[in-house]
Amino acid sequence: MDQIIKLVKTYRLTPALDQRLRLAEEIFQQIEPQLRFFVFGSLAHPAAQDVLQETLKAVTVSLTKFAGSSTQEFWAWCYRIARNKVNDHLRKQAADRLQPMPPEELWPRLRRRAVRFPPKTAWTFNMR
């Protein structure tokens, strides 16, 4: 049995909080670099840092629910959590971009850019 699986199983069976914290720290030291590489390969830096933290938090909260018995299953589980967090972020980002701009913000922007348009098109933006 691999070291990471031993740590996870011990974590799941340990009732003492101080021992669980120590075990969680050992698990994090092993999984954080590879999850960091995955998340930072998918997102830009500021967002990636937040998503990595969310991923590590989700792994911590769900560690007692992990039912696998091999290292491969554990890594698949960790990457699935990371992928879901990345996808959640991308979905939220796309939804934010689709929000309509209020007319009081839109018209001044269009008028500023209208100077670059051909005269007939620019006239349309100055009608209002």
Image (spheres, rainbow, N blue to C red):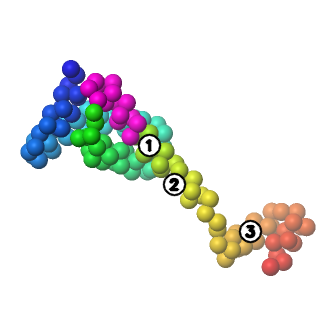
The relative height of residue 74 versus residue 96 in the rendered view (above or below) is above
- The secondary element bearing badge 2 is classed as helix
Farthest residue in the top direction?
1
Q: Mark 2 or 3, which is nearer the eye?
A: 2
Q: Is residue 72 above or below residue 117?
A: above
Give the x, y percent position of residue 105. Answer: 65, 73
Q: How many marks?
A: 3
Q: Nearer the viewer, residue 4 or 34?
A: 4
Between discs 2 and 3, the one toward the N terminus: 2
Q: Secondary structure at mark 3?
A: helix
Give the structural element (helix, strand or loop) at label 1. Answer: helix
Q: Position of residue 63 (x, y in %)?
A: 26, 40
Q: Which residue is mark 2?
A: 92
Q: Residue furthest bottom?
A: 128
- Judged by its main secondary structure, the magenta piece is helix
10 Å crowding of disc 3: few (<14), some (14-19), many (20+): few
The answer to whether mark 2 and mark 3 are in CB contact below 8 A is no
**From the viewer's perspective, is 124 left or right of 79?**
right
Numbered range of the magenta stretch:
68-81
Residue 84 has which mark? 1
On the image, numbered disc 3 is attached to which residue? 110
